[in-house]
Structures are given as C-alpha cells and as structure tokens.
Image: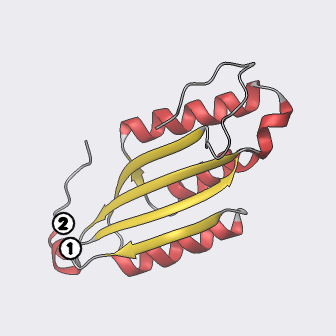
Amino acid sequence: MRQAQGFGDPLPTGAIPWALQMRAISRQEPVRMVKSLTGAILACGGWVLSRSASETGQIEILFEFERRSCLEIYSILIAAGLELSQSAHIRFTELCQCTRMVRKDCQGEIVSIDLEVQTSPQSAARDGCLVSPQ
C-alpha cells in the first residue's frame, strides 16, 4: 500500500514510499507466466526479489524498480497477458501520473510491488474456467 507523504516531508530511513500489493489473473500456465514475467521485469531494469508458483496455479512475485520505469513495467505486465484487478490499474495509473507530474528527483525512488496472480492449472485452463480477481 502507498504510504502518504507530504511534499516537504523527508522519507524515514528505510521507508519505501511506493509499496504496492496487486492482484491479477492470467490464462497462461503458471511456470510459463513466472518465467515470462521475470524476464520482462529484468529487461525493464527491475529486480525480482522472490517468486513462486503453486500447484493450484497461484503465483507470487515480489519485485522492485525505479519510478522512472513505471510506464514500462505497467506495459510489460499487460503485454505478458495479465488481467490486473481494478484496484491494481488504479494504483499503477496513480504511480505513473505522480511520477510524470512530480519533481524529477523522485524518478530514482524505488517502487516495490507484491504481485499475486491466479492462473489456471492446466486442466482448468483447458475447460475454460477462470475466476476474476476482486
């Protein structure tokens, strides 16, 4: 979640002003999606801190990037086939708008995203069953 900060307020040591939790769904196979997202995040200059995929199709990826790359990261998540939840779209839009409109010295700040993706195990994907995120 984004922590509120005033424009003149210094950041507390160790604080990440943009720490976001996001949910999404995908019709891709979990292992393929993890590899695809990891490669895309790294290609945009991001850092993948942890990643996992369960047998139930749940993927969790924790990654970070500099704010200057927010539009590229947003784009690659969509291009990778993720269907972000409405709140994830709103948060990413806010991040990109704030980065573009605020002072230039914020572009080096680090954004941390905890992304949870529900994919379909192979049998459910073949049957066309997939539940939308809230």
Number of numbered tags placed on the structure image = 2
Mark 1 surroundings within 10 Å by alpha-carbon count, few (fewer than 14), some (14 through 19), many (20 or more): few
Residue pointed to by mark 2: 128
Amino acid at dot 2: Gly
**Alpha-carbon neighbours of circle 2 within 10 Å: few (<14), some, or many (≥20)?**
few
Element type where label 1 sits in the image? loop
- Would you place residue 39 above or below residue 84 in this image? below
Which residue is depicted at the point 67% across and 55% down? 65
Identity, as a three-letter code, of the amino acid under mark 1: Thr
Which is more toward the observer, 56 or 21?
21
Q: Residue at horizontal 16%, vertical 72%?
A: 124
**Foreground: disc 1 or disc 2:** 1
Mark before the other along the chain sequence, 1 or 2: 1
Q: Which of the 4 quarters of the picture holds residue 99?
A: top right
The answer to whether 21 appears left or right of 7 in the picture is left
Q: Position of residue 18 (x, y in %)?
A: 58, 40
32 lies above or below 108: below
In the image: residue 81, left or right of residue 123: right
The residue singled out by tag 1 in the image is 56
Residue at left offset 66%, top offset 69%: 42
* Residue 122 in picture, x, y percent from top left: 23, 80
Q: CA distance from mark 1 to mark 2?
A: 15 Å
Judged left or right of residue 31, residue 79 is right
In the rendered image, the residue lying farthest to the front is 13
Q: Residue 94: x, y in percent?
A: 57, 30
Asked if marks 1 and 2 touch (Cβ < 8 Å), the reply is no
Judged from the image, the secondary structure of the residue bearing numbered disc 2 is loop
